[in-house]
């Protein structure tokens, strides 16, 4: 199965609009509303990816809460990077999220 590099792990524009609407259309984006694309997970620096993933996993609004399968996909992409060793803390966080009961 191939994925669009610009796809945000299954979330659609309507999901983002619903998240914005549920927070009063204030024009201020809540932490956790930025979900990186698959390509960004493959290419962002450790600091950027850390910020985006932590926001998404732990601060996202209800409409954008990641499912375990989505975070497992993120983990697989990070593990396939040639520089995966510098992302060990993110891999561990993803694993913890996926395995959390």
Image (cartoon, grey):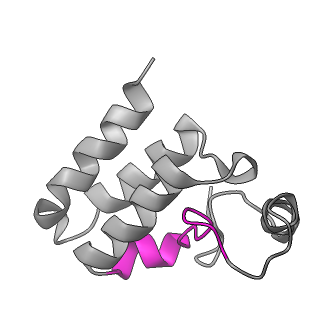
Vertical relation: 69 (above or below) 11: above
Q: How many marks?
A: 0
Vertical relation: 99 (above or below) 57: above
Vertical relation: 78 (above or below) 43: above
**Residue 74 lies in the magenta stretch:** no
Residue found at x 53% / y 71%:
36
Residue found at x 68% / y 53%:
64
Rendering quarter of residue 23: bottom right
Vertical relation: 22 (above or below) 81: above
Rendering quarter of residue 95: top left
Q: Position of residue 87 (x, y in %)?
A: 19, 61
Q: Position of residue 72 (x, y in %)?
A: 45, 43
The secondary structure that dominates the magenta segment is loop
Residue found at x 57% / y 67%:
35
**Residues in magenta, as a range:** 29-44
Residue found at x 41% / y 24%:
100
Q: Position of residue 11 (x, y in %)?
A: 73, 60
- Quadrant of the snapshot with the N terminus: bottom right
64 relative to 55 in the view: left or right: right
């Amino acid at each position: 199965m191939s994925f669009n590099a610009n796809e945000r792990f299954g979330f659609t524009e309507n999901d983002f609009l619903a998240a914005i609407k549920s927070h009063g259309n204030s024009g201020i984006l809540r932490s956790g509303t930025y979900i990186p694309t698959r390509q960004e997970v493959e290419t962002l620096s450790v600091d950027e990816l850390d910020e985006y993933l932590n926001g998404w996993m732990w601060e996202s609004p209800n409409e954008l809460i990641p499912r375990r399968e989505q975070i497992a996909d993120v983990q697989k992409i990070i593990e396939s990077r040639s520089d995966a060793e510098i992302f060990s803390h993110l891999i561990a966080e993803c694993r913890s999220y996926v395995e959390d009961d």
